[in-house]
Amino acid sequence: MSLNGTNAFSVNKFFQTSPFNLKETKDDTIAYIFSNQDGIYVGFFNKQSNSSMLSKKTLRDEMTSLSDKNSINIDFDGSGNKAYILAVTLGDSLFDAIKLKSGDFKTDWDGDWVAKTKKYDGYWTSEFYLPWDLVLMSQPSGSKRIIKYSALRYNAKEQTWISSSGSMASRPEYFEKLNSLEIDNYTKSKLNLFPYISSNQNSITKFDDNKVGAEIFYNSGTGKQINATFNPDFGQAESDDVVINFSAQETFYSEKRAFFNENQSLFNINNYDRYSVMNTRRIGSAPSYECDQENNSNECEGAKKNYSDIDYALRYSQKTGKTELGFFTARENDESFSVGRNFYAIRSRTNLGNKTLGYMLTHVDDSFNNSTATVNVIDYVNVKSDQLTYFTDLLFSEKNSDSKFGYRSQFNYQPSNFSYVSGSILYFDKNFQLNDFGYLKRADWIHFGLGGGLKKIDFAEKSLLNQIDMGVDFNYDSDTNGNSNPIRIDQKNTIVFKDTSSLSLILESKLQEKIQQLLEKILIFHL
């Protein structure tokens, strides 16, 4: 890394991360990073033949398109808890997401940033502009800010990713491998007000719907942010995919309403598709009715709605040093023959060296059903080394004086760049309640999982093979009484050839009953 005459830091060494072999390239790609009072600027210079440049315009967040791409991943606070992934294709299509240390990708977030590309003879360029008010950042005491980042490039014809950090967000050591950079720091406040007036009339049913509301977003530029919406209208929200679900578990739908995605990452405590402590899709869901108890039951049946209007929602969050605090509340409108619910959440998280300790409380007051639901969560992350990380969540639910317990423990271990081992234990009491404000795939659940993988890349230069990925997953699931499904062992193999074609072989097997009973006794004994 060097400092050139334009005061921009330049990076010219990159490492191939997909297919993963860490092969070094130099000067074929150069990334530049600098900051001023307006924001952070990132530029890419990409050498490439004209005939091999592929550009395709797609919808936002469609990252799988066969187009050349540049991406910048930034942890603005350098804390290792959260990174923002921003990418642009050669067709100027944008992708952005949030990668959480303790969870998965959050692609629902759409930030207010700009990126453009341009083709030249023998190369193409891209430029990113990230304003200081793009996200909530903690404010350092001096005039400098230390960020962690990774610059990436995707070559569509060769179907390869290269990265300045030698890692990608899909790899377990991603946060530990991010590059560190000191840049000039500035503060910038932002106030956005979006009022609206709408009027709708159904000429057949004579139903009139007149609304007045507003959304307010205020970022102080000093680590504090307030978002509020009053009588919101979410008529322009993206529709959900059609999912046919024949299982006993509820389908999880991600949040599509922009207000509930803005500055929401602090409240995200989740574990893949298994559970999410706060699921804002619950706010505004169908009201409860008791039409058979009403004198005019026919009118009640005719007034039923499959959604609730929202009176207001308010979110406040702040970053001070190594501590983050947040508060959230929302209130549903009282509908005909029903009463809206009140939602509350409090969140805190503190960095303690290589450890992160957090606490979260959610509460739902459903006066129509004379019900309350409260969930307390303690979450803990311990980065033992660049190779080993532990995750732990302790969950306590109480609904109508019925208290239940949940637990998640997980580790990710990477003994080398080309191998990994991971394992997890999950436990939820029978009738554990999380779905009033969150999402739980199933209660009355014991899960034990262990998996590992190995990459082989050292093939001869004349070989047709480029990479072989081998992985195995062991999964045991049962209820809290020990009644289990067959133990599953999944073995996956992927062969990537040098011409970019690939071959996958997946083997699934179930252990015999006697072996399974023996393993169940061992597992129950240890638990």
Image (tube, grey):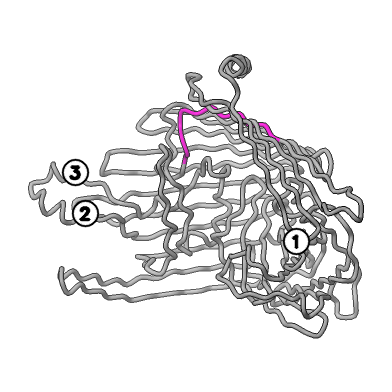
**How far apart are the two marked residues, 1 and 2, measured between alpha carbons?**
55 Å
Q: Residue at x 57, y 44 (%)?
A: 272
Please state which of the two labelled residues, at mark 1 or mark 2, is closer to the viewer: 2
**How far apart are the two marked residues, 3 and 2, measured between alpha carbons?**
10 Å
**How far apart are the two marked residues, 3 and 1, measured between alpha carbons?**
57 Å
* Residue hosting label 3: 290
The quadrant where residue 150 appears: bottom right
Q: Amino acid at mark 2?
A: Lys
Q: Amino acid at mark 3?
A: Glu
* Residue hosting label 2: 304
Q: Amino acid at mark 1?
A: Ser
User: Which residues lie in the magenta part?
Assistant: 440-451
Please state which of the two labelled residues, at mark 3 or mark 1, is closer to the viewer: 3
* Residues at circles 3 and 1 in contact by the CB criterion of under 8 Å: no
User: Alpha-carbon neighbours of circle 3 within 10 Å: few (<14), some, or many (≥20)?
Assistant: few
Percent position of residue 463, x then y: 87, 53
